[in-house]
Image (spheres, rainbow, N blue to C red):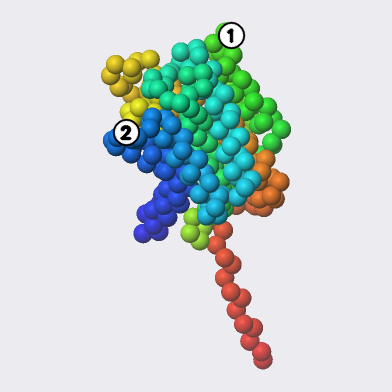
Amino acid sequence: MRLPTQLLRFAWLEAQSCAFAVALFVGLLVAYVVPLPLARYDALLVWCVVVTVAFWALGLETWREVLVVVAFHLLGLGLEVFKVHVGSWSYPEDAATKVWGVPLFSGFMYAAVGSYVCQAWRRLSLRVSGFDAAPMTVVAVLVYANFFTHHWVLDLRVPLAAVGLVVLRRTWVHFTVGDARYRMPLALAFALIGLHLWVAENAATYLGAWKYPGQLEVWEAVHTSKIGSWALLVTMSFVLVAAVKRWEGVLYAVPSAAVADEVWPDPPPARPRRHA
């Protein structure tokens, strides 16, 4: 029964780590089904700001983590403005808080990824081993740049993914579930997060958060190629959070000779010595 119990514990911790994303989807759902006194995109911006402030006020995120969320919001907003300009997707509804065709709430969808990483770091006691920040930061910057440049030059997502796999070939993410300690390749974690973000993207476009060209008339599922794109984008989020965690001294795991599915239980109590 230990494996099912651990899986349930892990699922619950992951669900808690997605609190910001869940709150964002609650706002999307309410705005989708309930008539509002203001434009939907404007209402979503107000909701996202309230959620961000509430997370900080309730101690769910530190002020440093809020800064990471804000940074990722700005990076995401810049990407959104460009992508809407070139026609990759659109926000067809009117709103007072749209800038160059992009509602300001859209950056919070990227911020939700940064919030998830921060929350998971705390709830699962995440640490990394074999992580070299400098080359990974270079890869993350190139990934972000490629989302812009591939419209004019060769799309380098596949080569960048290959380089990222090489850089992360010895990098593990360590995490705690219950009384046990586990680890998995960091690259695998990125891929799994990318898969879940693709599922979330399908739900968000169904609720009309934004629309791809093929969804303007009738909704259709987002192409599975976006899974890889999201996995690559997660590298940028991770690098931002890792910089904060390194400053806080909680980035790297204590060196261990444990195996891949390591478990670090508490040592058994010492037996009392018998005296002659």
- The residue most toward the top is 152
Are the residues at dot 1 and dot 2 in contact (C-beta closer than 8 Å)?
Answer: no
Disc 1 to disc 2, how far (Cα)? Answer: 38 Å
Q: Residues within 10 Å of mark 1 (few under 14, many from 20)?
A: few
Whole-percent x, y for residue 256 in the image: 65, 52
- Quadrant where the C terminus is found in the figure: bottom right
Toward the viewer: 226 or 171?
226
Toward the viewer: 86 or 243?
86
Picture quadrant where residue 69 is located:
top right
The residue identified by callout 1 is 153
Give left or right: position of 242 versus 19.
right
The kind of residue on which mark 2 rests is Tyr
* First-in-chain label (1 vs 2): 2
- Quadrant where the N terminus is found in the figure: bottom left
Mark carried by residue 64: none
Give left or right: position of 123 versus 67.
left
Whole-percent x, y for residue 100 in the image: 51, 18
Q: Residues within 10 Å of mark 2 (few under 14, many from 20)?
A: some
| Image: 68 above or below 119 | above
- The residue most toward the bottom is 276
Q: Secondary structure at mark 2?
A: helix
Q: Residue at x 59, y 14 (%)?
A: 149
The residue identified by callout 2 is 32
Whole-percent x, y for residue 174 in the image: 57, 48
Q: Residue at x 35, y 35 (%)?
A: 37
Q: Residue at x 33, y 19 (%)?
A: 215
| Image: 197 above or below 98 | below
Q: Nearer the viewer, mark 1 or mark 2?
A: 2
